[in-house]
Amino acid sequence: MEQKSQEDLDKYYMKLSIVEANKSIPLESAYCVGAVLVDPKTNTILSTGFSRELPGNTHAEECCFLKLKNQEKENIIPSAADVIKNSTIYTTMEPCSKRLSGNIPCVEHILRYGVARVVLGVKEPENFVHCTGVQLLRDKGVEVTILDGFQEECLKPNRHLDLKF
């Protein structure tokens, strides 16, 4: 079986993230984002998520982590933190650095869990807050890749908003 390049894997998982984003119910006060958490050693999907999938005004990345935490509580996995550490998260939009709701920003979740790499399709528009997620992650040593060629597909689930850049 042919080994896929990292670029091919990145494109594949970003396409899956876009599928997740399209599951989000549009709101005038929020983006529709999708995320896929992957173990880069085995290229297996650990978890998926989309905006507001779980109760509590949840973001896509947060849903990935919460699902694994729930598996830990149900004794399906021994430690969500161990599973998440050194993983790669694919997200259609830049992880948030500030939340108007007061919830913990996705950047803080990513750093707390020790995610090693973040791959995103588009930087966060300026509609709600000034996001500095990419810079904050890079400053803390997280590898961040912004994929070329996915901006339109990643923004499409947000066509209900007048996006500002």
Image (tube, rainbow, N blue to C red):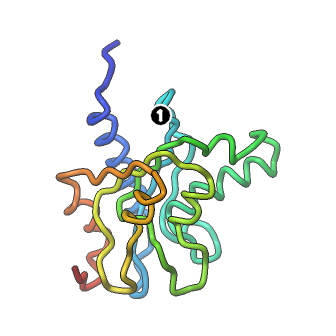
Lateral position of residue 50 relative to residue 4, left or right: right
**How far across and down, in percent of the image, does residue 24 sit?**
44, 68
Circle 1: residue type: Pro
Farthest residue to the top: give it.
1
State the count of labels: 1
Residue under pointer 1: 40
Q: Secondary structure at mark 1?
A: loop
**How far across and down, in percent of the image, does residue 121 sit?**
29, 57
Lateral position of residue 131 relative to residue 163, left or right: right
Foreground residue among 72 and 99: 99
Lateral position of residue 86 relative to residue 165, left or right: right
Foreground residue among 21 and 100: 100
Indicate whether 121 appears above or below 108: above
**How far across and down, in percent of the image, does residue 107 sit?**
51, 65
Indicate whether 111 appears above or below 59: above
Indicate whether 19 appears above or below 158: above
**How far across and down, in percent of the image, does residue 42 sit?**
50, 27
Q: Residue at x 36, y 82 (%)?
A: 130
Q: Residue at x 32, y 48 (%)?
A: 15
Image quarter (top left, top right, bottom left or bottom right) of the N terminus = top left
Lateral position of residue 131 relative to residue 71, left or right: left
Q: Residue at x 47, y 34 (%)?
A: 40
Q: Residues within 10 Å of mark 1 (few under 14, many from 20)?
A: some
Q: Splitting the image into 4 quarters, where does residue 5 fall?
A: top left
Image quarter (top left, top right, bottom left or bottom right) of the C terminus = bottom left
Indicate whether 18 appears above or below 28: above
